Each structure stands twice: as structure tokens, then as C-alpha cells.
Amino acid sequence: MRRSALFFTVTMLLLTGAASERAEANPSRIVSLNFCSDQLLMQLVPAERIASVTHLSRAPLGGLSASVKGIALNYGTAEELLRLDPDLAVAGTGSTPALRAILRQRGIPLIEVPNAESFAAIRANIRLLAHAAGEEAKAEALIAHMNDTLVHAPKIPATLRPRVVGWDGAGSVQAAGTLFDAVLTAAGGVNAAAEAHMFIIYGRYRAFDPERLLALRPDFIAYGSGRDLANDLASAELQHPAMRRFFAHRFIAYPDTPVICGLPQTADIAAQLARAFMRKAAP
């Protein structure tokens, strides 16, 4: 009887240990339901542990599209989520109550990655996702590389600090408190839109039209080039004759995914802008 009891006790300990080990194991079927979380996830976690990312990341200009190869794509539907049966779901902060309810019912953890409006927020988001995925060491390596890029970015002389507008081509510019503003500051520029108190403010964006932009007279206009600008109606304003006349050779394009999403590569955009400012300002 004692031998049987001992056998039962040992068996239960082994089963409990196995269950505990499974509970502590890193998630191996992670699903991303947001374009920006796709970008962070694919840099932190090996592809074999990613069950699916959004279909948006498949586009040629969709960020880290080369990393999508071999990873299933999703459209964010409940049916897909149930079929994929993830052990971790990653999304933005705009997750619907229905999605949260489905995940809660299935016991699937959800990590919501907030929008990053500063380099400090980018670091926090990387660490948030890395902790959930069990990839803290990879996170610190990415952050260290980002910090190093910022430290060694070209330094613009104070006498050359340009006034810049981050123009989206669709009637608004990025004011103080946005990630673009943080990138521009790191690049040594001054956000002219942050000075423009006379313009209408929508959150951290200001309503601009070409006439107001011309009146502001920035040294450069920077715009994101993550979309096909040649065929995008929003870019038509950039082709306005007055814009081309007054700002010829003063348009600067940058890849917009790192600035939209807040990624380790956002530091590269700051360095790229600094180089462009110095190159265009050179006599």
C-alpha cells in the first residue's frame, strides 16, 4: 500500500512538474493582429514560433515583408483566430470587445502594444512584447543597436538647424508630441509645425493646406514614402505648381513604417534625415 502511495505521489509530482514546465514555456504559436505588432514580432521571435501575421505585411512596402515568407497571413477575423489556436495574441490598443471576449473565453493571453510617440515608448514596447514572448535578450540587443544609432547619428551644426514640416500630403502635419517630432529632434531639425499656433489642432496633428504651408516657409518638407506616392491621391498636393516652385529640391522622403509603428529602425530614419539636411544645406 505504501509502495502504491509512493508511486502515486511520484507520478503526481512528475505530472505537476511537466505542467509547470509547459506553463513556463515560451509561446510557440503567436498570432499578430496588427500591422505594427507584426513588425516588432518578426524582429523579436523566430518565424517558426509565429503562427500568423496580418495580410498587410505582405505588401511590397509593408515594412519587413521579406520576413513574412513562410508565415501564414490573417485578416483579423474571429474564425481565423479560433482556427489558428494561438498561445499568445498580439494587437494594437484598438482591439474590439468581441476580440477580447473570444480570447478570454479560450484562455489565450492578449498583449496590446500601444502607439509609440517617443524613443522611450519604443523601448518600452519592445520590452513589453519581448517579455510576453520570452525574448528579453533579443529585445535588449535591438534596443542597444537603436541607442547606438542615435548616439552616432550625424550632428547638424547649430547654425544649420533646419525648420522642417512633416507633411502627409492630405491636409495635416505632425506637431509636437508625435514620434515624427522626436525623430526630427534627434536628427537636429526643428519642427516648424510645433511653432504654428495659429493653425487648427487635431490631437497632435495640425490642419494644413498648401497655402498655410507656403506661409509657414519651412526649410524642408519631409514626407513618408511607404506608399506608392506616384499613384496616391494624397500626394497630389505635393505636385501642386506652387509647392514645386517654392520647395523645389527641398522635399525629403523617408520610409514611413518605422515612424508610423515605432520600431528599432526609427533611429535609422533620424540618421537618414540628418544626412539629407546636411547634404541639401551644403553650398
Image: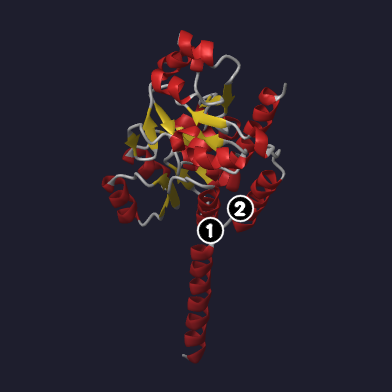
Q: Name the disc covering residue 61, or none.
A: none
Q: Is residue 57 above or below residue 236?
A: below
Q: Residue at x 38, y 42 (%)?
A: 81
Residue underneath mark 1:
131
Q: What crowding class fits label 1: few (fewer than 14 Cα within 10 Å), some (14-19), or many (20 or more)?
A: some
**Amino acid carrying mark 2 in the image:** Ala
Image marks 2 and 1: residues in contact by CB distance under 8 Å: yes
What number of labels is visible? 2
Residue to which mark 2 is pinned: 139
Residue 263, located in which quarter of the rendered image? top right
Image coords of residue 27 (percent x, y): 51, 54
Residue shown at the point (66%, 35%) measured from the top left = 159
| Amino acid type at mark 1 | His
8 in relation to 49, above or below: below
**Residue count near mark 2 (Cα–Cα under 10 Å), binned few <14, some 14–19, many ≥20:** many
Asked if one can make out residue 47 in the rendered structure from this viewpoint, the answer is no
Q: CA separation, marks 2 and 1?
A: 9 Å
The secondary structure type at the circle numbered 2 is helix
Name the N-terminal-most of marks 2 and 1. Answer: 1
Q: Residue at x 38, y 36 (%)?
A: 197
Location of residue 135 in the rendering, given as x and y in whole percent from the top left corner: 59, 55
Looking at the rendering, in which quadrant would you find the C terminus? top right
Residue depicted at x 57% and y 41%? 185
- In this rendered view, identify the residue nearer to me: 74 or 174: 174
Considering only vertical position in the picture, is 39 above or below 227?
below
